[in-house]
Image (tube, helix red, strand yellow):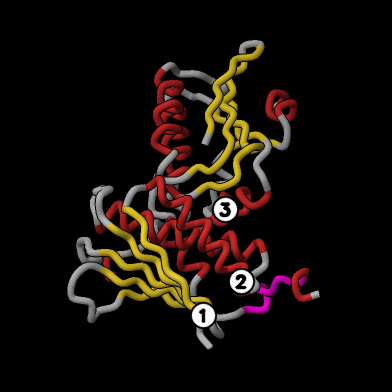
Amino acid sequence: MKIEIAENKGLKVIALSGDIDMHSSPELRKELMVLVQKKVSPLYVDFRGVSYIDSSGIATFVEGLKGMMAYGGKLKFVGIPERIMEIFCFAKLDKVFEMYGTMNDACNS
Amino acid sequence: MKEYAAITVPSNPKYLSVIRSVTAAMAGLYGMADRVRDDVKLAVDEACSNVIKYAYRGDTGKKIVVKFFIAKAFEVVIEDSGIKARPECIEGRNLDDVRPGGLGVHFIRRTFDVFAFDKERKKGNRLRLIRHRREEDEDRDRRE
């Protein structure tokens, strides 16, 4: 998995690519929790390059969201591939996370 | 005839990608559609992650054996030499209770019809996962 953190016009974006699994999710957790501790909001996660996610990856985002909710932060997912969306839906998390098709949609929400 | 393949990998999470690749390849040989193949790959990954996490308590120097049997059903057997699982305690979280963890078992159970630990195994665990052929499994593109 590759993690790129970018700031563009004041927007903080984590762009992910590759597989998010038990091997890679600790690194993602570390990066995510640094941003949560800094109380970043909104925080955008670009899923367009993600090819796979397992329960450890999902748990990482649930933990991040819970941390952000403590300070009223917004976590916004962008461009989730269909197969990964299906996993979020099965886990009933499509109603928990804010999900958008494009960065524009996410920014304008 | 039952076709068979097996892999042995270290109990290191970096080898989960290898397990996923082989699982997907075997599911492809069975003739599963891509969508079902992804579900099977996720379920086997979750089961092996549980071996690392619970049976080996994170010890990356042990072994995981994954065996695939292709016949009428698609069967995966996962063996370890770690701490005995307590099947009666294995339960996913309520999906309405949003918190980290507790999803892996749901991913396994929704995909496989049989999720059973071998009670006869003296040391370690042998988990048997069986998916009976379903209409949705068929890779129609391959058949045509």
Q: Residues within 10 Å of mark 3 (few under 14, many from 20)?
A: many
Give coordinates of residue A64: x percent, y percent: 44, 33
Q: In this rendering, do the residues under marks 2 and 3 share a single chain?
A: no
Residues in magenta?
B134-140
Q: In this rendering, do the residues under marks 1 and 2 share a single chain?
A: yes
| Tag 1 and tag 3, C-beta contact below 8 Å | no
Q: In the shown orientation, is residue B19 left or right of residue B28?
A: left
Q: In the shown orientation, is residue B91 left or right of residue B83?
A: right
Residue, far bottom: B1
Observer-nearest of B82 and A108: B82
| Tag 2 and tag 3, C-beta contact below 8 Å | no
Q: Quadrant of residue B118?
A: bottom left
The residue pinned by badge 1 equals B3
Mark 1–mark 2 distance (CA, rounded to whole Å): 10 Å
B65 is within the stretch colored magenta: no
Amino acid type, label 3: Ile
Please give the chain letter of the residue carrying mark 3. Answer: A
Give coordinates of residue B125: x percent, y percent: 27, 69
Give coordinates of residue A26: x percent, y percent: 39, 36
| Tag 1 and tag 2, C-beta contact below 8 Å | yes
Residue in the image at 62% along x and 32% along y: A46
Please give the chain letter of the residue carrying mark 1. Answer: B
Give coordinates of residue A80: x percent, y percent: 65, 41
Residue in the image at 39% along x and 28% along y: A30
The residue pinned by badge 3 equals A87
Observer-nearest of B53 and A32: B53
Residue, far top: A9
The residue pinned by badge 2 equals B29
Amino acid type, label 2: Leu
